[in-house]
């Protein structure tokens, strides 16, 4: 029987988490009664990602394994989309676990013609300072929605007011194929591409996207200093690719970052005291921002303590991204 839903799960070294992701998916599929296939795209993992996923699936779900060298999430999703059989596709990440009734909610809405949904994703914090930081970043970025979570829809005009991401996103396969084909990254190496914001903005320009706490999931973030810094650096690279475009509300901040950070670096070389002063200013600003939003004390402490580290790593990622763009342009010249 042809599946109604294809779940595309790209994974790179996610053995520690992917078992819970697949188990949650199996339960959500069971409750929804959707005929579903799972396509796991192994993006060059060096751990037991595939074996753990197979064990968690345990014959309860049709499972196909695709393998590729480490080409990045965009290419993994493209491979999954090309192999998918379902008319409807759920993009899911290895660190995201669906709520038990998430797919049942979407199935009812799809029957009424509402077939494009982004997940309401909560960050699992568990009082870890790094996880609290990521949780707060997400909720402050879209505080209007998270202050009053509800079932609603948004389009290109209201795109920046709502949380969205391709880590938990469902849409017709054809729409996703067209979005991927239309996407152009600034980077020649697609593993650095931002496969969230540009793709979803393209879709929102053509179709309304739904978001609801009834289509929810939990994201498990990085929770150590090393992974925090590496993830922040990568976010800087993908930030340039996703928001270094005029349609983004962050375009001018992205452009202005480069001269501003250059001036700050020159000032720090001339007067090293600028470095601790800048770090203190970033911490104080982050804490004041969180206070105005009436966040919990441990969240404010986490944001204030980690904001300078995040700023440095994220900024370094943006500079690395710009260097790759320049390098690629010079090669093509």
Image: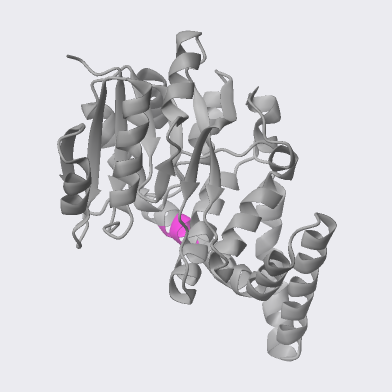
- Residue situated in front as seen by the camera: 35 or 253: 35
Whether residue 77 is in magenta: the answer is no
Measured as percent of width and height from the top left, residue 11 is found at 29, 49
Residue 72 seen in the current view: no
Seen at 45% across and 33% down, the residue is 169
Is residue 288 positioned above or below 117 on the image? below
Measured as percent of width and height from the top left, residue 22 is found at 29, 43
Left or right of 319? Residue 83 is: left
Magenta span of residues: 323-327
- State the image quarter where residue 152 is shown: top right
Which color scheme did the rendering employ for the protein?
A: one colour
What's the magenta bit mostly, secondary-structure-wise?
helix
Left or right of 108? Residue 153 is: right
Residue 22 seen in the current view: yes
Seen at 37% across and 32% down, the residue is 28
- Residue situated in front as seen by the camera: 91 or 121: 121
Seen at 65% across and 70% down, the residue is 302
Seen at 24% across and 19% down, the residue is 3
Is residue 107 positioned above or below 311 on the image? above
Is residue 299 positioned above or below 265 on the image? above
Left or right of 131? Residue 226 is: left
Left or right of 84? Residue 292 is: right
Q: Quadrant of the N terminus?
A: top left
Measured as percent of width and height from the top left, residue 242 is found at 54, 45
- State the image quarter where residue 328 is shown: bottom left
Measured as percent of width and height from the top left, residue 36 is found at 27, 25
């Amino acid at each position: 029987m042809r599946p109604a839903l294809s779940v595309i799960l790209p994974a790179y070294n996610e053995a520690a988490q992917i078992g819970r992701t697949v188990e949650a998916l199996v339960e959500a599929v069971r409750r929804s009664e959707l005929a579903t296939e799972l396509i796991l795209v192994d993006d060059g993992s060096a751990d037991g990602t595939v074996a753990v996923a197979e064990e968690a699936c345990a014959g309860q779900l049709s499972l196909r394994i695709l393998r590729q060298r480490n080409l990045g999430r965009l290419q993994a999703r493209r491979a999954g989309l090309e192999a998918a059989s379902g008319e409807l596709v759920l993009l899911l990440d290895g660190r995201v676990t669906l709520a038990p009734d998430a797919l049942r909610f979407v199935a009812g809405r799809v029957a009424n013609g509402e077939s494009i949904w982004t997940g309401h994703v909560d960050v699992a914090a568990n009082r870890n300072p790094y996880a609290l930081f990521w949780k707060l970043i997400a909720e402050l970025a879209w505080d209007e929605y998270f202050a009053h979570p509800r079932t609603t829809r948004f389009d290109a005009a209201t795109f920046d007011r709502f949380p969205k991401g391709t880590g938990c996103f469902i849409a017709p396969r054809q729409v996703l194929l067209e979005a991927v084909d239309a996407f152009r990254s600034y980077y020649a190496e697609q593993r650095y591409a931002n496969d969230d914001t540009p793709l979803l903005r393209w879709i929102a320009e053509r179709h309304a996207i739904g978001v609801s706490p009834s289509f929810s999931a939990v994201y498990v973030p990085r929770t150590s200093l090393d992974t925090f810094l590496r993830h922040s650096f990568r976010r800087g690279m993908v930030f340039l690719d996703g928001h270094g475009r005029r349609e983004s509300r962050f375009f001018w901040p992205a452009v202005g970052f480069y001269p501003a950070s250059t001036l700050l670096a020159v000032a720090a070389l001339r007067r090293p005291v600028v470095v601790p002063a800048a770090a203190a200013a970033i911490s104080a600003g982050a804490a004041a921002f969180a206070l105005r939003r009436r966040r919990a004390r441990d969240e404010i402490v986490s944001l204030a303590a980690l904001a300078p580290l995040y700023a440095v790593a994220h900024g370094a990622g943006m500079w690395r991204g710009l260097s790759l763009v320049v390098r690629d342009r010079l090669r093509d010249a």
